């Protein structure tokens, strides 16, 4: 079956992850991405603003017997206070957490700060997967802000790709992929 954006978001990062890598989950939620990264990287920094996300994720990591993730109850826009190592891979799942308070959504301004901070710290060859959900109120603005920002990245320094369903009704999520090509940015 054709690969869905959410699956490609993982495959894109799996190609470059190994047990020397430091990775960031910028939007922890229920911990699906944190679990995926933690199984493949040396160390994972995961961020969320909801206590529920930390509880759920730490429970899932414990069940899997993994102890190489640091879970931070703070917005991803503050990631530079915690992530001191070069970053190999990062993932964003924007929007709200379906099982929690749907009014707590990622916001364009802070999302862009976090993307910028990750790009600065990304290793050459490092990658970011950004899943865009935009069916909720405010989602459209965030989608446009992120697309606008990514489109302006210098092509000599970054390769960027979009993976999006073309014939699906409503507002199907899509994936933006970024790879850092050179040190200068
Ligand atoms: C679509 S959900 C993430 C789903 C998650 N990746 C998973 O595997 O379940 C978006 C998450 O972003 C979180 N969030 C909102 N603003 C944030 C911020 N400034 N920094 C980090 N996380 C934030 C929300 O609390 C929510 O849990």
Image: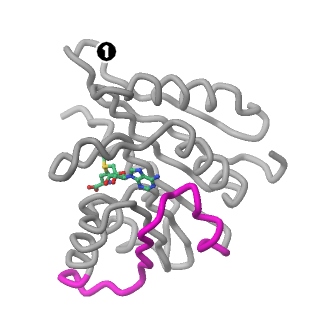
Q: Quadrant of residue 151?
A: top right
- Residue 70, percent across and down? 44, 78
Is 9 drawn above or below residue 132 in the view shown?
below
Q: Is residue 116 magenta?
A: no
Quarter of the picture containing the C terminus is top right
Q: Please report the residue visible at 39 percent of the width from the left and 66 percent of the height from the top.
A: 37
Left or right of residue 133, residue 81 in this image = right
Look at the numbered disc 1 and give the secondary structure of its residue: loop
Left or right of residue 28, residue 155 in this image = right
Quarter of the picture containing the N terminus is top left
Left or right of residue 123, residue 145 in this image = left
- Residue 35, percent across and down? 30, 69
Q: Quadrant of residue 135?
A: top left
Is 102 drawn above or below residue 51 in the view shown?
above
Q: Which residue is mark 1?
A: 166
Q: Is residue 76 magenta?
A: yes
Left or right of residue 155, residue 25 in this image = left
Is 182 drawn above or below residue 139 in the view shown?
below
Residue range (magenta): 62-84
Q: Please report the residue visible at 32 percent of the width from the left and 62 percent of the height from the top.
A: 50
Residue nearest the viewer, comparing 70 with 127: 70
**Label 1: few (<14), some (14–19) or many (≥20) C-alpha neighbours in 10 Å:** few
Q: Quadrant of residue 123?
A: bottom right
- Residue 106, percent across and down? 41, 43
Residue nearest the viewer, comparing 6 with 16: 6
- Residue 117, percent across and down? 66, 54
């Amino acid at each position: 079956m054709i690969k869905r954006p959410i699956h490609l978001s993982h495959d894109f990062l799996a190609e470059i992850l190994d047990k020397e890598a430091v990775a960031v989950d910028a939007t922890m939620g229920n911990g699906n991405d944190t679990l995926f990264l933690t199984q493949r990287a040396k160390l994972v920094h995961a961020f969320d603003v909801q206590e529920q996300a930390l509880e759920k994720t730490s429970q899932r990591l414990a069940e899997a017997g993994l102890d190489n993730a640091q879970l931070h109850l703070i917005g991803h826009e503050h990631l530079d206070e915690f992530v001191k190592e070069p970053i190999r891979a990062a993932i964003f799942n924007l929007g709200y957490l379906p099982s929690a308070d749907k009014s707590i959504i990622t916001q364009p301004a802070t999302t862009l700060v976090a993307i910028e901070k990750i790009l600065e710290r990304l290793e050459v060859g490092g990658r970011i997967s950004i899943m865009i959900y935009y069916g909720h109120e405010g989602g459209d603005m965030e989608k446009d802000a992120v697309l606008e920002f990514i489109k302006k990245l210098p092509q000599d320094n970054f390769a960027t790709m979009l993976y999006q369903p073309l014939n699906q009704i409503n507002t199907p999520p899509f994936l933006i992929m970024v790879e850092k090509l050179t040190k200068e940015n």
